[in-house]
Image (cartoon, rainbow, N blue to C red):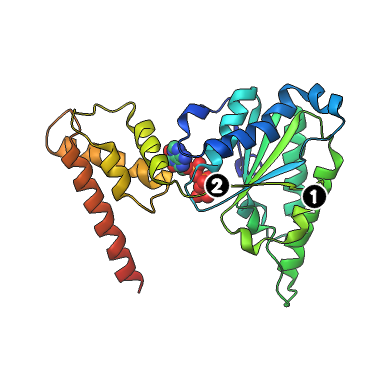
Amino acid sequence: ARAQAMEITERPEVGYEDIGGIDEQVREVREAVEQPLIEPERFEEVGIDPPSGVLLHGPPGTGKTMLAKAVANQTDATFIKMAGSELVRKFIGEGSRLVRDLFELAREREPAIIFIDEIDAVATTRTESKTSGDAEVQRTMMQLLSEMDGFEARGEIRIIAATNRFDMLDRAILRPGRFDRLIEVPEPDRDGREQILEIHTRGMNIADGVDFAELADETDGYSGAEIESLATEAGMFAIRNERDEVHHEDFVDAFDKIEADDSSDVISSA
Ligand code: ATP
């Protein structure tokens, strides 16, 4: 059960070239995570410690997990992913135990990138009501912080966490020596959406006349993940129309379908 809570990938198949619209964030992650692994002597020479932990924050589906996987790929590090929600356990000590196992595994497999998704599950500001469940979650968090304190800043294990609820985070985890490098990963802008469309259609049979610029204009508010589903859905329309090339109208049909599904969600959840 313990191993199931973690996802281990020797070499994730995601490269920086697969990530669109967040070049600045890619640069920052490389500087904070990749460089200390590849050229630790640079930090030594200058006499500073690299950031202890990096926190990626921003809306869902914007590429936070991709960023973490791409650094692992680039540095040949083992990628170990754990969802924050997995660390919230019923039995006393179980969450802390998982945290210890997580770091132990990272030490066995170093160089390693530990990625904790939904860190907010164990690190939200506690309300007044101190239930025993809350106290247990708090202990798990303390265990995580103490593991972070324990490892060499210039060592072979790097830790990245992600959240889409930054405002709710317990500020204690952001102190120096903890998650002390914050990187905001925003929704893509127009040009970013165009880049992401190009990335996700690279392997598709796209007809002349598909206007990515127009599609980028129309998809204001779409995340990278939503643009990916748009491309897949357009492919579905091509198949339905018994074509092997995807036409502009397939993208428009896909867009209309996604928009219609979204508004029916709003109606049914109202
Ligand atoms: P969550 O907060 O929901 O975990 P996330 O920010 O970690 O989301 P990812 O898991 O990295 O999002 O993205 C989900 C999928 O959406 C990716 O596998 C990718 O196909 C696509 N995607 C998201 N952002 C981008 C991007 N910037 N460039 C290219 N593809 C993207």
Closest to the observer, 266 or 26: 26
Quadrant including the C terminus? bottom left
> Where does residue 51 sit, x and y in percent of width and height?
76, 39
Tell me which amino acid carries mark 2. Answer: Val
> Where does residue 96 sit, x and y in percent of width and height?
77, 51
Residue placed furthest toward the left: 242
117 to the left or right of 207: right
Quadrant including the N terminus? top right
> Where does residue 128 sit, x and y in percent of width and height?
73, 77
240 to the left or right of 2: left
Please give the name of the residue rendered at 83% of the width and 35% of the height, measured from the top-left corner: 49
For residue 2, above or below residue 108? below
Picture quadrant where residue 54 is located? top right
Please give the name of the residue rendered at 70% of the width and 73% of the height, measured from the top-left corner: 127
Question: In this figure, which residue is indicated by the disc labeled 2?
Answer: 185
111 to the left or right of 71: right
Q: Is residue 247 visible?
A: yes
Local crowd size for mark 2, using a 10 Å CA cut-off: few (<14), some (14–19), many (≥20): many
Tell me which amino acid carries mark 1. Answer: Leu
- For the image, the number of numbered tags is 2
Residue placed furthest toward the bottom: 129
**Viewer-nearest of labels 2 and 1?**
2
Q: Which numbered disc covers residue 161?
A: none
Disc 1 is placed on an element classified as: helix
Task: Check mark 2 vs ligand 1: CB closer than 8 Å? yes or no.
Answer: yes
Please give the name of the residue rendered at 23% of the width and 29% of the height, measured from the top-left corner: 206
Local crowd size for mark 1, using a 10 Å CA cut-off: few (<14), some (14–19), many (≥20): some
For residue 57, above or below residue 29? below
Q: Is residue 92 visible?
A: no
| Mark positioned earlier in the residue sequence (2 or 1) | 1
Picture quadrant where residue 124 is located? bottom right
Question: In this figure, which residue is indicated by the disc labeled 1?
Answer: 145
